[in-house]
Amino acid sequence: MADIHNVTEFIFLGLTANQDLQRVCFVIFLLLYTAIVLGNLLMVVTVAASRSLGSPMYFFLSSLSFVEICYSSTIVPKLITDLIAEKKSISVWGCMTQLFFMHFFGGIEMFLLTMMAYDRYVAICKPLHYTSIMNRQVCAVLVGTAWMGGFVHSLAQVLLIFRLPFCGPKVIDHYFCDVLPVLKLACSDTFLIGLLIVANGGTLSVISFVVLLASYVVILYHLRTQSSEGRRKALSTCGSHVAVVVLFFAPCVFIYLRPTATLPIDKMVTVFYTVVTPLLNPIIYSLRNAEVKKAVKSLWIRAIKVDQK
């Protein structure tokens, strides 16, 4: 067990100290979390049940929606219960567990978004070889690699924190356990560990973001030679992905690619990639994709017919 000395639990300050505002936030985040689970679950079920959505793009999209559910579930339920709890506490083991799974699923999402960009690159720039390059085995290996990459990334983050001594104070100025707020509570010099954490989390975010931007620069350059209809369809699909990428990566880069100091605005920024992005992902991909909308409508009609029997 970590060398925690006399500390067995941490106390969250939460999003706000205003009790009236906490009750309002409780209702808002409960509704948002319900929408996150239902929206992403609908995407997973739709892709699994629809033959028309059998391409690699939808396989990655389904995997992303499943990860979004898991990612939000490591943070938002605890946030919701703490908004109406008198004592917002979490055990040290619970804190380390939350920290691990938050970075585990967050890392998977980074890798999946990068792989989805690669899928679009192959589909647009090498359409004749798309089915041979992005076959089922390759897609399964890529998703498996994303899960392995997320595990390695998260394990590195937790191991850097796990052996630190915690002897007080034990108040975390946040609404969940993350590396930088927890690092501030350690009773030892954390400068080197802080740099390693920034190097791990921040560098991963930046490298993934740069690779994504580079892939879309290549795609846009290639689209010059295509017809206007082909450009429109490609840009529609890529536009959805770019929107999701910006919503997720911009806050992550802001939080993890800077010195270990925390800022008051950090709580609001983290709401974007822990709540807003998982909520908007299925909306963005479904509203801008005619095939997904058609598949959802077909699934809905089939469900109604089953209920009527």
Image (cartoon, rainbow, N blue to C red):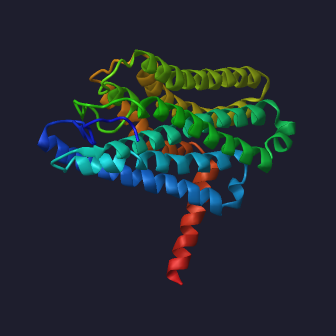
Left or right of residue 86: residue 50: right
Count of numbered tags: 0
Q: Is residue 258 left or right of residue 288?
A: left
Q: Residue drawn at (24%, 47%), measured in percent from left and top?
A: 82
Q: Can residue 245 be seen in this view?
A: yes
| Residue positioned most to the bottom | 309
Q: Nearer the viewer, residue 210 or 259?
A: 259
**Residue lying at 33% horizontally and 42% vertically, measured from the top left:** 92
Residue 222 occupies which quadrant of the picture? top right
Tell me residue 227's x, y (percent). 77, 29
Q: Where is residue 224 in the image (x, y as percent from the top left)?
A: 75, 21
Q: Which of 18 and 226 is in front in this view?
A: 18
Q: Which of 308 and 84 is in front in this view?
A: 84
Residue nearest the observer in this picture, 6 or 287: 6
**Res 4 → quadrant:** top left
x and y percent of residue 154 in the render? 52, 36
Quarter-wise, where is residue 47 in the image? bottom right
At a point 72% along the width and 54% down the height, the residue shown is 54
Does the image show residue 240?
no
